[in-house]
Amino acid sequence: MRKVRTFSNDKELVSQRRDHIVKVATSLIAKKGYNRINTSELATALGMSTGGLYHYIGSKEDILYLIINFTSDLTSQVLEKFSAYLKDVTPIVAIIESVRIYLETIDNYRDFHNFLNHVMLSLSINDRKIIYQAESRVVEYFENLLSSGVEKGEFEIQDVKIVAHNIIAIAHTWANRGWYLKRYYTLERYIKEEIAILLQQITKLSPKSIEKTIARYYSQDSKTSELLLEDA
């Protein structure tokens, strides 16, 4: 992992400032494009001087690197919280909660995902590997969850990798095409509809049973996703 230059020895302060820089930079880049912004414009958006900005980064390229690593770290944090919270629940409950929380996380950080998807092909091989590894961890998490459901007799799936990838695609569709989908769906309704379709594909539950299952578990612990998103 490449080291980003800083003139501060306060690691906590540097981490806080860089998180703020990343969030503001991603929003600005999403609107104007990476090649159309400069550090002076970013410093203004941050309410800092250009010199103040360079106190925490060494170059404009460092911002791109920080965005990539922020997204990778976010993935790790969310997966850790998934594992801690869902380890003692049934596979059906776990898949409902996991899909819901993952989609809410993607929605909360959609600028990051849209930006990285946009610049992916122009990144260096090493930077692409960081993103690939982060995505692979998410796919692997859902693969393990689905495989557990198959082993316990709750799911019937021939190819868990494809189903796991489709879950990721559902979330990225919301991030990439939210401008269109939001005309017809709230995030909550979109999640419920997609979970229903998923359960129809991987379980023997009737549509009525699926509807009741989703309603029951979606309302049972509404604070879970808020906690995970707040801590991430």
Image (cartoon, grey):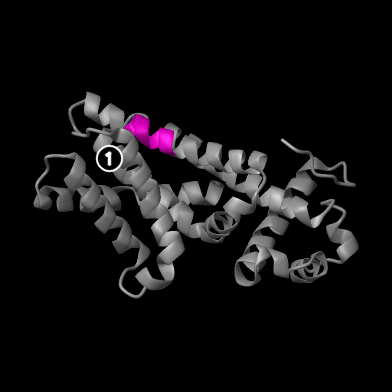
Q: Is residue 48 left or right of residue 98?
A: right
Residue 143 vs 113, above or below: the answer is: above
Residue located beneath label 1 in the image: 93
Q: Is residue 209 left or right of residue 80?
A: left
Three-letter amino acid code of the residue under disc 1: Val
- Residue 140 in magenta? yes
Q: Is residue 111 left or right of residue 10?
A: left
Q: Which residues are magenta?
A: 139-145
Q: Residue at point 32% right, 39% down?
A: 162
Residue 26, image x and y in percent?
Answer: 64, 61
Residue 176, image x and y in percent?
Answer: 45, 62
Question: Looking at this view, is 202 or 214 the one in front?
Answer: 202
Q: Name the secondary structure under disc 1.
A: helix
Is residue 35 visible in this depiction of the protein?
A: yes
Q: Residue at point 78% right, 57% down?
A: 60
- Which residue extends farthest top? 151
- Which residue extends farthest bottom? 183
Q: Quadrant of the N terminus?
A: top right
Q: Residue at point 70% right, 48% down?
A: 65
Is residue 17 visible in this depiction of the protein?
A: no
Residue 17 vs 129, above or below: the answer is: below
Residue 37 vs 196, above or below: the answer is: below
- Residue 1 in magenta? no
Q: Quadrant of residue 183?
A: bottom left
Magenta part, dominant SS: helix
